Structure formats: C-alpha cells, structure tokens
Amino acid sequence: MRKIQFVLIVLIHCLASSQNKQLLYNFDAIPQSLLVNPATAIEYKWHVGIPVLSGNYLTVGSSAFSAFDLFAKNTIDFNTKLSSVISNASDRDALLVNEQVEIINGGYKLGNFGENRGYVSFGVYQELDMLTYFPKDIAILVLEGNKDHLGKYFDFGHLNTKAELIGVYHVGYQKKVSEKLILGARIKLYNSAFNITSTNNKAYLYTGPGTNTVYEQLIYADMQANTSGISQYFNNNDGNTKTKVDPYKIAQKTFIGGSVGLGIDAGFTYIPKRNLQIAASVIDLGFINQNDNVKSYVLNGSYQYQGVNPNFESSSTFENVFEKIKDKIAVTENDQSYMTWRPVKINGSVQYSFGQKKSEGCDCTNSNGTYRNDIGAHLFLRTTPKMPIYALTAYFKKEILSKLQVKAAYTVDSFTSSNLGLGLSAQLGLFHFYVLADNLLSYKDLSKSNEISLQFGINLVRYEKEE
Amino acid sequence: MYKSFIFFVFLIQLSLLSCSSPLDFNQTKDLVLKPVVTGNLSYFDIDNTKLIKLGIIDNQVIVDSINFDLFKGQFFEKNLEKAVFVYEIKNKLNTSFTLETQLIDQNKQTLKTITIDVPAYNGNTNGINQSEIFDKTAIDVLLKTVQINYKLSLQTGQSINNTGNLVFKSYADLYFAIQ
C-alpha cells in the first residue's frame, strides 16, 4: 500500500549553530542542508518555511580568548587579565561572528511522481558577518607604549577587519543527471546594507637606538578603510549633518536599496556505488559592488622623526615639526565605489554506507538498496584575508528507527580541537523535527568555550510518494 | 516516536542547564591603560667654528626658538600623568657653557627655565646627563607650552680656543593613564 508522508515544514529554530554547519551538511532529512550543498540527495515533494520563524543562526568563535579569560569573577585585576590575553594572542587569531535569519524558504519537485525533472528551492535570508584579526602590535602599543620595546617594528598591518550586513535572495535547482550523479546550483542576489573593509594594510612605527639623535624613529603608512552604507551616520567634512540611526530603515535597507552583487553556489553528489557517496560544494562565490554612501579613508606617507631641533642660525625658526608630520602622513577621503568578495565556503566529503534496510512486510532487504548506517569525513574551508578557516569532521549517522536518524560528529577546527557534536532528525506524526548541538564538551563551562552552537527546528515535510 | 520527542526535549534542557563559571562584565570600568611613550625631543651638534660665526664670543648668548605645541589638546590634558625630559650633553671644547631651555606659553610668558651647566672638556668623554620631571601640578606647564627657547652662552670669563664640538641630545618619556 502506498504510504504518503505528508508534513508541512514550520521551522522554528533559534540559537547558535556552528558556522561551518558540519552536522547539517549532507543531512538530507533537513531542508536547510540544500543551502550547504545544493546537490544534497533529498527526496521531498515540497517544503516551505514559515516567514521569519524558519531559521535563526548565530555563531561566535574566538581563537584568541574566551569570555572567562577576560571577565572571570575572581580576585585578578582586569588590567592583568587584559595584559595576559594580549600577551598570549597572535595576529593570526581571529574573532568571527556570523548571524543569519531566514525570512522565507521553500522548494518543490518539478513534474509528477517518478519523473526526474529536478527540484527547485528558493528563499530570502539576512546575514551579518564579521571577521576581525587580533591587532596584536597595536594592542601592545596602546597597553604598554614603545619605551620597553626599543628595536621593535610595531606592525599596524595587524589591523585587518571586515564586517557586512546583507540580504540574500536565492533560487536553486538540482537534478539527478544520471544514476550516479546529482548536480545542483543556486543563484544569489546580494543586497548590502553596510560594509566595512580594512584589510591589506601596511604600516609600521619603529623606535630604535639612533646615531645622532637618541632614537631613530620611523613612521610608515599605507592603509585604507573602505565603508559603504554608513557614512551618512557620521559627521563629515562635506558639511552635511549626520543622519540619525534608525533600526527600521537599516532593516529595510538590508533587503532593498543598498549595494548590490551576485553570487552562485554549486555542488554535486556522486554515488559511484550504492554504498559510497562523494559530495562537494562551493558556497557564496560572489561579489558586491559597494556604491551606496561610500566613504573611504586612506592614510599614506612616511616620516623620520628626529625631534624639534634648534640650529641657532635665525632667531626664530618657528618650524612646527608636528604639523609637518601631519602633512607628510595625511588622511585623505574619497567616495569611489569598490568591490568586495563574499567569503567563499568550500565543502568536500566522502561517505560509506552499510547495513542495508529491510523492506516492509517481508524479511528481505530493500530493493532500493538504502542503508541504515553512514560513516564519513567532511572538510570545510572558508576564505579569509589571511589563512583560510578550516574544519575537519569525522561523522557517523544512523537510522535508528524509520524516520529517526542520529548523527554524531567530531570536529577539529580553527577555534577548537575538541568539538563533539550530536544531531537528531525525527518524524513524530505529522511533524519532522531536528536538533543539532555542537561543542557538547563546552557545556560543562560555557564561559571557557571558544565556540558555542546549538540549533533546533520543527519541520513539516512532504516526501515523494512511494509506490 | 515519543522516545525521540523525549530525547529532543532532553537536548533542549541540556542547553538550558549548561554550566558557566561566574562572569563579571562590569570589570571593564576598572580598565586603565598605562602606556609609556618615548621619543626624541631635541638635538644639535655645534662646533667651535659655527659658535664663533654665530657671535657667541661677542654676544655671549645665542638663541633659537622652536614651535612646540605637542601637548596642546584634550587628549594630553586628560591622560598625561607624568613626563620626564632627559638631556645628554657631550662637550669637546675647553670651555664651559650654560644651556637654558625655556618653556614659553602663548602669551610669550616663560613658564619654566631648565638650566644645564656644561663643564669644559677634561678628557672624560662620557658627558653629562640631567633629567627634568614633570608630574602632578608641573604637568600644567607642559600643557600650556607652545614654544621652546634654547639659549646657549659661555660662562663668565670663558672663550673658545680649541677645535671641538658640543653635542646635545634629549628625549622625553611620557607616562599616560587612560581610563
């Protein structure tokens, strides 16, 4: 007898999820897995999410320090704690914040039952993404000064930060092009409410023993900070008064009226044998042309400071050395548009399945050749202005009962080397729900964690009819 | 299926019952940054020929004035806690000098005069060092300074009668307390 699985998806998920989404990747029972690989081997007839309630993601990762390192309630003075954090951090340490709110999400299978015409998915989501590297030398200079660091080049190139708020409209399509291969792709239209980018800076401040003067002191700067979408909120030299910050207008600007760009996702799932699956995807290969309220600041120049030196040759030299420094190392502004690239995410996985499922109604294996158990490995990379952020995951997924799947994963990534995660996908009556919890070991003391995540949702899904 | 529902509730409860060591974010109010910044202050290297050409023997005093308004502005007013000026002088002339450094305000008034007695060269190449400390109320003098006058004069009865030079170097250590 044909069994019809009919469920509507109502997604209510909140809280945090790991930004690399290793538990979600290739978890085909969860529709959001299509946003991590557009060629995920799904078998839905259709799915839809309730607007705004369909998905909220937040991840915070800090490789330099945890909340406990700075804010522990103990007898250690805060200044001592700060000094210790700065001492132990390096300019390769990063702070990452990524937040997403899904506005709408849906999809449907083209054609009738049994036809292979592909699956279309679409949606709109908002994303806030911030990545900043620890400005180690700048922090040392501010905290300690240069007196105890003679001979050191304070590298102002450690200033390396990007932040943006965008709305994303997307349409995706996947098709089983052969018995062994599923291809998928997604087109994205980005709308940027604001962007701040200051990367690729070169500058230094040097104080060392001098020959004539006590010190040799050098300043060199080749720095730039680009902003779009925010200059109207600050006083500027053009004489225009600043605009008051209006959260409603910012929310509106996230989806319309900002800087625009295009991007694509692409992926494949290759099944060379029934129990072997190789999948890969590239996400957010795209750019945004930042041209909305652009204001860029350029600091350029060099100077060798030798002091304010008399020569006694005229009674009034009246040279102002400090004005001279300002002239030599000047800040200039411009409003030229600039281009930014979205952080590209790359996924690759290999999965082996075993334990063939039995058909219902008889003590025989399922003719479809589906399996109860999967083990696999998954590599994730995200591009950054410096070294890519990575995550390497080993996972085991099991179908415990019909429509109840559990996935356990162990991940080593840029923020932690002990990320143990657990995911559950299950169907209860008309409802399909899931929960994905990363970094379970950190729950014994969240304040000491470098990365925290939890995600859960309730879905209603209609599956393809079974004959 | 109820087992899976219970497991789902358990995992949600897990997140709510997770532990955290006590944290206090109000500690940021205790933040005080105390950097010490050092930098060149002044330098000159003047030999006997130039000294005579400038008329030090006839006029006894040679003077130069330099704009110096580094410490003007709210940042220094609020955050500069102490400053130390350090002078190093090496004299290779068989003549003693007096060097006066005068700190002048915008009304051309002399706020402070730092006097350095430079002994004649006696074969000791180490030179002399002298420090001037500005802290507490003395910081005000620096905050009002817009000009520095350097006055170099021969001490009474002195003359220049050998070949050599007078090298003056100085630097400043600035101590900040930024809250």
Image (cartoon, coloured by chain):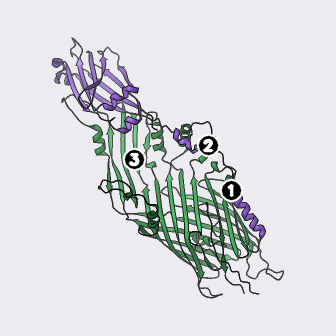
| Three-letter code, disc 3 | Ala
- Dot 1: element: helix
- Dot 2: element: loop
The residue tagged 3 is: A203
The residue tagged 1 is: B16
Point out which mark residue A72 bears.
2
Q: Is residue A448 depicted above or below B9 in this figure?
A: above
Q: Is residue A336 depicted above or below A327 in this figure?
A: below
| Three-letter code, disc 2 | Ala
- Is residue B135 in view? no
Q: Position of residue B88 (x, y in %)?
A: 35, 24
| Residue A33, picture quadrant | bottom right
Give the CA distance from mark 1 to mark 3: 46 Å
Shade representing chain B: purple
Q: Position of residue A318 (x, y in %)?
A: 22, 34
| Residue A358, picture quadrant | bottom right
Point out which mark residue A199 bears.
none
Q: Earlier in the sequence, mark 2 or mark 3?
A: 2
Q: Which chain is green?
A: A
